[in-house]
Each structure stands twice: as structure tokens, then as C-alpha cells.
Image (tube, grey):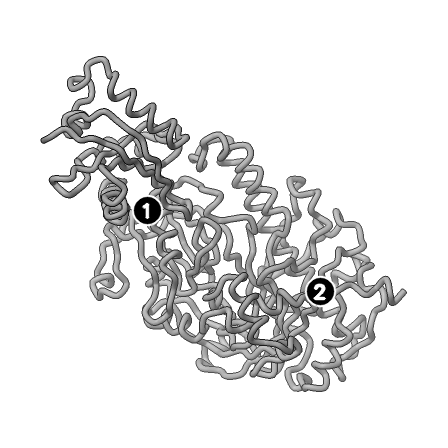
Amino acid sequence: MDQLELDYITVFPYGNQNLQKAFWFDQEGFDAESMMADPESFDPKGTLWKKFIKTCKIKLNSKTNFASLFDEEAGYLIDSFRDLLKLFKLRKLRKQELILACLNKKQAAKFTQITEEYFLSQLVESDSSLNAGVHVICKDTIYEEEAEAQLKNVILTHKDVLFSIGMPDLHPGRGYPIGSSIITNEVIYPPLIGTDIGCGMSFIKTPIPSSKIKTKAIEKWAKRLRSIDTYLECDHEELANFEFKWATEENVPALKEFGKEFFNQIGTIGAGNHFCELQVFEEILDQEEFEKANFTEDSAYLLVHSGSRGYGKHVLDKFITEYQQNGVKGFEPDTPEYDQYLQEHDDACNFAKRNRACIAMRFIKELLGDSEALDEAEGEFNQEETKIDVQTDIKILDRLDCSIDIWHNYMEIEEKLIPTTQVDPLDEDWKSCDLIKQKVVIHRKGATPADKGYVVIPGSRGSYSYLVKPLEENAWLSGYSLAHGAGRKMSRSKALAKGKHTHKNIESLLKTPLENRVVCENKDLLYEEAPEAYKKVEDVVSDLEYFNLIKIIAVLKPVMTYKFKKDQRKNDK
């Protein structure tokens, strides 16, 4: 092989949206094949090799200690990935960057995609006794290539990943895909869960008869409903420890001291796609299952979507500051760091559950006041809503029946049946795939558990939601997870720009084609969360049904969605 004159180098920092940074430099030629096969015999003193690596580091401002070279004649990357993979497996590469040195800029551009695909395939084939697999549970739902690339990048940048699986509502997130279930070999990676640990949904039977859900009543409620975003005026520590039942026969655990500084946020929805929505059953598709689960058409239900607020962000920020910035990407089992994160994670999940319960309490209190007489389903309005007596007001929860409470940003450690090979959901062979039982960590980011009973998959505020029963026999295919909603098809910035152009009269967004009344006084949020910014939830649910992951029990119609309202109490007093 002739000597190669290298004058171009490009780096692929996987996990970063900017896939390559290019730098030109002059370099002495050397026999790349011999160099990579045995650097010491080719260059006994290591002078040339050290110079090359030093130049790479200087030009790329990188701490990586590996460079792979492209063989122009052979037309493929020379066989040096074995060494790279070995370093990954031995955890000796902290900054996982693949450096590709080429003859010229044109060649580098030409083989950028080949390099990425080759590296992924090599990593998948060599990473463990179980092949690391990437697939999306999708037949008709459209998802962006960027989201699938993020699924692949999870494998490239995290050594112990077994499977990286996208749900039908998959869409790109900030570095990590939303609508994903990432299964690892016992290692915990906090960023795969994200900032809003414990974010999820509560589905609550209210004391409001569905027969009372009339347009006139809804308009009256919407006008007098005041902010439930402001902090409650109460003993927040008492609120954090008060015992009550919520979608379980056991009491919700009292909160630990980890998040004490965030206790005042309990009972607040938060921004983004969080909401509180009053719903009624539109259609029952499986009457037997519906009755078996003790649901009823006679009552209105409340769907609350919120999380751990600032507490979850605090937990992740702590990880980034204390560990990730020092080269630690995840936590191994049986270490103090692992146990500490697990405690804080579980506490944040309980925080989120308690938060959803208090949001429901506030919402119902706003609608019904303190009245016990529900004949008119209107009650008496309480002028001092932010001031609550925990011992008294929390008893409103006794009048609510939380049927479902699930997290969709969290992780669990369990023994699960895992495929022994990669899986293609569109290939019928997946049904005969061999499974083995193994202890794993399931990281869910925007994914509902498929093995915890009934779940509600909500659409946008302009579409129906679906009550479904997960079919656990096929849960392994989707990483024991389901879609957590419709999933965005438009970024917030794009939805905002398009919304301002399309909806000149913003009042039109306060009422959907389903006659759902939207309560939101944040104009940008109205545009960002407009129904057209989301995929069709019907397609998402249809895909889950196609792969035999769910049975649809009933369809729910939204009648009033609360997003945000300014606090007017100061003006009222």
C-alpha cells in the first residue's frame, strides 16, 4: 500500500447534532495499514504516531486518543475498529468521538455516512453477547430522521445499551429522543430520563356527572377558573408528608429531604405540554373490559399531565455538574453514586405523583368550591383558593377516585425477557424471536410502561384520547413501553411561527373542532401547543394495535383543557 498524504481530518462527536467539524492541516505521509496494525514496529519511537495524535488533539481540541484512517484504494475504513471497540468496552474512551482522517475534503464528505453506518454496525455486532438493537414501533406514523439518529447515537455513546427503541410518537429531543425506551445492562444513565423525572399522568374519576357537562356550564367554569400555576399558601412541608391514597391501596410515600427547597412547587402544572383536562367517555369499544376495570360513563374524568417540576431538573443538574463534566456518563450497580441517584430518582417520582394529586385537588376545588351539594355541579367559589389548610382541603382527594397514575419519564430495574438478536417489527419473524431473562435497567423518556395495567394515551387538545389495555405478552418488542401521547411533528419554534401566520385571530385557538374549551392566557403557548403541531393520535394508537401491543377499551373526548392562566387574585382582593 502506498504512503498516504493526509491533509484533512474530520471528527464525529456522537450525541451532538453538529455531526462533523473539519480542520485542514499538513501531515507527513506514512503507511496507514502498517501504522494501524502495529504502530510500534512501524514507528519504533512512536515519533510519527505521537505527532499525528498531537496534531489531531490540537486541531480538534480533543482528549480522544484514537484516530481511524480511510484507505482510498480499498474504499473502506481499514480494520482498526476492533481496537476502538475494545477501548469502548474497557471504558478507556471517556470522550467518545470517532476521528476519521481522509485525503481530502471531498473524500471525507463522501464517506461521512458510510463511516457512521459502519461504526454503528460494528458496535452493534461487538458490544455484548446480546446484540444492541435499534428499532421503531411504527407502521403508518411518520417520524423524523433526526429522532431515529438520536436512537442510534444512544448506542454509539453509551457502552452498556442493549436496545434503543422508539415508540410511534417518537420525536427529537435535546440530544436524546422523546418517545423512547432504552434498555441497558444494569447501568443507569440519568440523561436518558431527562430533567422532568417522574413526569406522567393521572386519570381521575371526578364527582361531576357527565350529564352536567354542557356548553353553558363549561363556559362558566372556564371564565371563573383562576390560576392553578401559582404556589399554594400553606405549610409546604406538611403537604409534602401528608398521607393519602392515589391510584394505589397504599399511601403515597412521604417525600425525603432531597427536594425540600422545591416543596413549594407541589400543586403546580408547569410549562410546555403539561395540562389538566376534563374529559368524558365518547365511545366504549370493549364493554366487558370497561366494566371489569370499574370505569363509568356517568362521571367526568380528569387527566392531569405534570411532573416533578424544579426538583427533577435539580437532580439531573447535580449529575451533570458533579459527574458528567468529569467524564462519568453513568452509574454502575453496587456503587454509592448508583444508590444515591436511585434514591433521588424515586423521590422525584413520588414528588411528581403527589404534585398531580394536588393539581387535581386545586382544579376540582376551583370548579366545585367547598360545596358538598353537587346537584348543579357548580358549587360555591372560594375567593382565597391559594390559601389551603392541608388537613382540611386535602380531603377533597377522598372525593376523587384516581384510576390510573403512571410515570413516563423514569427508569426501573427488573428482570425482563430480552431478545437475543436485533428485531425488525415489520418482519413477521419477530414473533418467533428467542428471548432470555436478564436483569436490566429500562430508561423511559416520554414512554408509558406497558406492564403496569391500563393507560390513557392522550391526543392533542383538539383530538380524542384513548383508554387502552397493554398486551403484556408482546411487551418485550417495545421495550416494555408504549407511546405516551401523539408526539410532536413540529418543533416549538416552527409551530409558533406557523401558528402566528395561520391563526390571525388567536381567539380561534380557544375552541377546538371537538368543541373543547381551552383555558390558556399565554399566546405563545397557544401557538406552540396547537393541535396541528402534533401527530395524529389515531395513527399512533393504530400502530400500537397493529403490533399487538394494546387493546383499545374506550375513546375519550376533551371538554375543557387548562394550560395557563394569569394570577388575578391580587386584583380581586
Q: Which residue is labeled 2 in the image?
A: 361
Which residue lies most toward the top here? 45
- Name the residue that disc number 1 marks: 162
Q: Looking at the image, which residue is at 74% across and 73% down?
A: 367
- Amino acid type indicated by mark 1: Leu
Q: How many marks?
A: 2
Q: Quadrant of the N terminus?
A: top left
Residue 316 placement: quadrant = top right
Q: Is residue 164 above or below residue 361?
A: above
Quadrant position of residue 403 = bottom right
Where does the image place residue 477, in percent across and percent down from the top left?
32, 59
Residue 437, given in percent of the width and then of the height, sits at 31, 48
* In the image, residue 128 above or below residue 1: below
Residue 538 appears at what percent x and percent y?
A: 43, 75
User: Which amino acid type is shown beneath numbered disc 2?
Assistant: Met
Instruction: Give the residue furthest to the right.
Output: 573
Between label 1 and label 2, give the one nearer the viewer: 1
Instruction: Work out whether residue 84 or residue 71 is closer to the camera in this orientation and state it.
Output: 71
The kind of secondary structure element at disc 2 is helix
> For this rendering, which residue is in front, 209 or 33?
33
Give the side of residue 22 with respect to residue 131, left or right.
right
Image height check: is 156 above or below 480?
above
Q: Which quadrant of the rendered structure holds the C terminus? A: bottom right
Residue 332, given in percent of the width and then of the height, sits at 42, 34
